[in-house]
Image: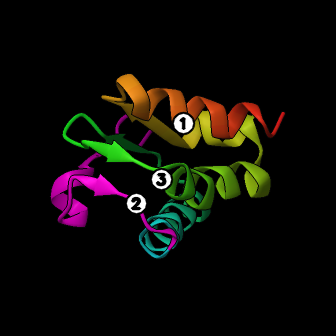
Amino acid sequence: MSAAESLQTIDVKTWTGTEILGSRELARRVRAFLVEQIDKEQPVTLDLQNIEIMTSAFADECFGKLWDRFGSESLKTMIHIKGLTGNNKAIFRFVLENRR
């Protein structure tokens, strides 16, 4: 099975039970799941379209630390982000751009 065939999509609001991604604790839980997926070489798409607020603390703890651990190329092939808009998109980009 190719990576594209095994790609799973997760509605983050449904999965986490909240439309606010704010705490580092929640970010650590999401990051732990994503690390498992990367370790198993199972790409995943995170659908963030129903997320109202993503804080810089969440983005740093989850996505920033993944970037630090795995690097940009690995993340780009294993974790796909869709549905980021407005401030959430700006925060996501800010957190990762400061790691280059």
Q: Report helix, strand or loop for mark 1.
A: helix
The residue tagged 3 is 42
Q: Upstream in the sequence, badge 3 or badge 1? A: 3
Q: Determine the CA span between mark 2 and mark 1.
A: 13 Å
In the picture provided, is 68 more to the left or to the right than 39?
A: right
x then y, percent, for residue 94: 64, 32
* Amino acid on which disc 3 is placed: Gln
x then y, percent, for residue 33: 45, 68
Give neighbour class at mark 1: few <14, some 14-19, many 20+ (Cα, 10 Å): many
16 magenta-colored: yes
Dividing the picture into quarters, in which one does residue 20 lie?
bottom left
Q: Determine the CA span between mark 3 and mark 1.
A: 22 Å
Q: Which residue is painted at 78% across and 36% down in the image?
A: 98
The residue tagged 2 is 22
The magenta-colored residue range is 1-24
x then y, percent, for residue 55: 46, 50
Q: Determine the CA span between mark 3 and mark 2.
A: 26 Å
Q: Which residue is painted at 48% across and 65% down in the image?
A: 27
Give neighbour class at mark 3: few <14, some 14-19, many 20+ (Cα, 10 Å): many
Q: Upstream in the sequence, badge 2 or badge 1? A: 2
Q: Upstream in the sequence, badge 3 or badge 2? A: 2
Q: Is residue 96 above or below residue 67?
A: above
Q: Is residue 63 above or below residue 47?
A: below
Q: Report helix, strand or loop for mark 2.
A: loop
* Amino acid on which disc 2 is placed: Gly
Q: Are marks 3 and 2 in contact (CB under 8 Å)?
A: no
In the picture provided, is 45 more to the left or to the right than 11?
A: right
Q: Report helix, strand or loop for mark 3.
A: loop
The residue tagged 1 is 92
Asked if one can make out residue 24 in the rendered structure from this viewpoint, the answer is yes
Q: Which residue is painted at 55% across and 43% down in the image?
A: 78
Q: Nearer the viewer, residue 42 or 56?
A: 56
